[in-house]
Amino acid sequence: MAGDWTPVHDRTDAEDHYVAMGTSGNQFKNAPVIGRPMATLVHSVESGHDHDAQPPV
């Protein structure tokens, strides 16, 4: 979790590893909804998109 208590949904420095973490407390109920954007992120990055240079809108 970030210092401001915002969940982190991102790839890691480890190859082929992604995280959706920090959904405890007030964000816990949102955890099931994160699957779709995480799937989009993984598919996009694994297809060669650099989401750090050009994040989704």
Image (cartoon, rainbow, N blue to C red):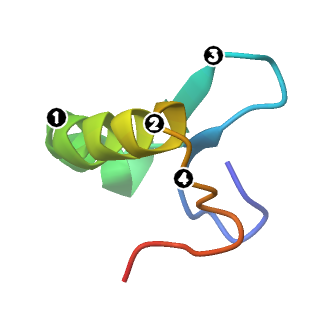
Q: Are marks 4 and 2 in contact (CB under 8 Å)?
A: yes
Residue placed under numbered mark 2 in the picture: 47
Three-letter amino acid code at disc 3?
Answer: Asp
- Between marks 2 and 1 in the image, the one whose residue lies nearer the viewer: 2
Crowding near pointer 4: few (<14 within 10 Å), some, many (20+)?
some
Three-letter code for the amino acid on which mark 2 is drawn: Ser
Q: Which SS class for mark 4? A: loop
Q: Are marks 4 and 3 in contact (CB under 8 Å)?
A: no
Going by the image, does 34 lie left or right of 48?
left
Q: Amino acid at mark 4?
A: His
First in sequence: mark 1 vs mark 3: 3
Residue 18: image location, x then y, percent: 57, 27
Kindly identify the residue that appears in the image at 34 percent across and 53 percent down: 27
Q: Is residue 22 left or right of residue 17?
A: left
Earlier sequence position, callout 2 versus callout 1: 1
Query: Which numbered tag is attached to residue 49?
Result: 4
Residue mark closest to the camera, 4 vs 3: 4
Instruction: Report the side of 39 relative to 51 (left or right).
Output: left
Q: Residue at x 79, y 64 (%)?
A: 3
Whichever of labels 4 and 3 marks the residue nearer the N terminus, that label is 3
Residue 53 vertical position relative to residue 8 in the rendered view, above or below: below
| Distance (Cα) linking label 2 and label 1 | 24 Å
In the picture of the structure, the residue carrying the numbered disc 1 is 32
Which residue is identified by label 3?
A: 16
Which of the two discs, 2 and 3, labels the residue nearer the N terminus? 3
Find the distance from the CA under tag 2 to the CA under tag 3. Answer: 12 Å
